[in-house]
Image (spheres, rainbow, N blue to C red):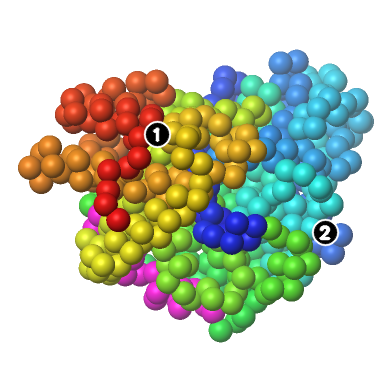
Amino acid sequence: MKKLCLILSVLFLAGCSTQETTIGKSSTKIVYNIDVTNYEDDLFHVTVFVDGLSEENNIYNMPATVPGTYDVLNFGRFVKTFKAFDKNGNELASEHISVNQWKISNTDKLAKITYDVEDTFDADITEDDVMPMGGTGIENDFIVMNTFGVLGFFEGLQSNPVELKIDYNSNWTIGTSLNVNDQGYYIAETYDRLADSPVLLGDLTVASTMVNDIKVGVYVYSADTSITADKILKIADEVLQSAGNFIGYSPVKNYNFLFCLMDMETFTRNNFHGAGALEHSYSSLYTYPARGSLSNSRRDAMAHEFMHILTPLNLHSNIIQPFNFMIPTASEHIWLYEGVTEWVSDIMQLRSKLITTDEYFERFSQKLNISDRLNQDISLTQLSREVYSDQGIMDFINFYNKGAVTAALLDIRLLELSNGTRGLREVLLELLKKYGKYKPFLENEFFEIIVNITYPEIEQFINDYIKGTKPLPFVK
Ligand SMILES: [Zn+2]
């Protein structure tokens, strides 16, 4: 995630990921319907159709946290009027047992549940703020729908296939990376895949390009109609092609950039505390003020989010796959997911000559200056483990600063030890081939794996600068 944090007045970022899950009945398909045709009431009207559930599936869960946010969000807070019915339309008893959970009686008779969801943009909440790129918004001329903010899953059925029908204003365009079937239903192999797929609705402009063999789409809602998908693609195309050169292959077939560019009145009215982007496996969602949206900083944000298709999306720990939506659980490898990704998004621009060596080092200096203002006594792994704490939230920004510089220094050390033949890019690509989207590495073995496939000296580097708090070896 990339957040423009207004509190800190600096570029503030946060992380990532996805995946499959738990045991459940593979035969049970979950069919969701979201009605936002008449959205004047500011609610998502949800119906979930099911059949053949049993006692062990008697809880409907809304996420407490979601990949990439490293935040407690408790989406159950926004659900209203939850009701359960049998196939004859008789209501079944249900109970709101915790902020994110509803327990349903006689689940074997359950045919559908219905509920409404308030959007997070203007919800009346006083704590655990939801950033716009990780939330939901119903506005007059667009709708931002992170699916995890509207749809939940039945206990034990997180891995079951799902279908989603969205009823919306027929004049609008829809932007999403979900596949659609012949009946007009969006389909996903699991809830995780559904939750990994945000949806943008409105009067959108659309453009597309190819990056290696990846079909890249850009969908733009903009309060300032002079900002179009074509223009955004034009400023991003070079950096996307440089990303393609850096990766050298195509980890995904399709990728979409979803831009929701709002006017300042919308930002102020909704009392947003920041702006930014959230990465997903096949898309990323950007919620920014329209003003300034054709700047290089947006291009850098697109580069960063797009490069998350490397890590964590295709290289991640077993702690985040399967993803635990209900109990926030931290991996100690955010230095990799965010620090390395930020380094990649800079070094690829240097390699493609989009920035000069001086500019590259200038970015380094800026990162080090920000890092100097943050806590020096917490290692990158400890910061990862404590990411859900208040202190973790405040210091998270250091993954994009100290984390990115540490990655750059690791690259230099690897090049030094290999006589310039094998840097962090080569090691990263080897790891991507070995693991990938559906094969997580073991959380506690990852450092050992890196040392084993590189050089014994790398263990010292990890102990000093990633697990430890030794000052980084550079001269200003
Ligand atoms: Zn990120």
Q: Position of residue 7 (x, y in %)?
A: 65, 57
Q: Position of residue 21 (x, y in %)?
A: 54, 26
Going by the numbered disc 2, the residue's amino acid type is Asp
Q: Quadrant of residue 241?
A: bottom left
Cβ(mark 2) to ligand 1 < 8 Å?
no
Q: Secondary structure at mark 2?
A: loop
The one nearer the camera, 120 or 336, is 336
Going by the numbered disc 1, the residue's amino acid type is Thr
Calculate the distance from the C-alpha at mark 1 to the C-alpha at mark 2: 48 Å
Going from N to C along the chain, the mark reached first, 1 or 2, is 2
Q: Quadrant of the C terminus?
A: bottom left
Q: Position of residue 469 (x, y in %)?
A: 40, 34
Q: Which mark is residue 261?
A: none
Image position of 238 (left or right of 97) = left
**Residue 389 appearing in the image:** yes
Q: Which residue is mark 1?
A: 469
In the figure, 171 relative to 391: above or below? below
The one nearer the camera, 220 or 416, is 416
* Dot 1 crowding, Cα within 10 Å, few <14, some 14–19, many 20+: some
* Dot 2 crowding, Cα within 10 Å, few <14, some 14–19, many 20+: some
**Residue 181 appearing in the image:** no
- Which residue sits at x=42%, y=71%? 296
Cβ(mark 1) to ligand 1 < 8 Å?
no
- Which residue sits at x=48%, y=30%? 382
Q: Which residue is mark 2?
A: 42
In this view, which residue lies farthest toward the top? 55
- Which residue sits at x=13%, y=42%? 416
Magenta region: 227-246
Image position of 62 (left or right of 336) = right
The one nearer the camera, 50 or 421, is 421
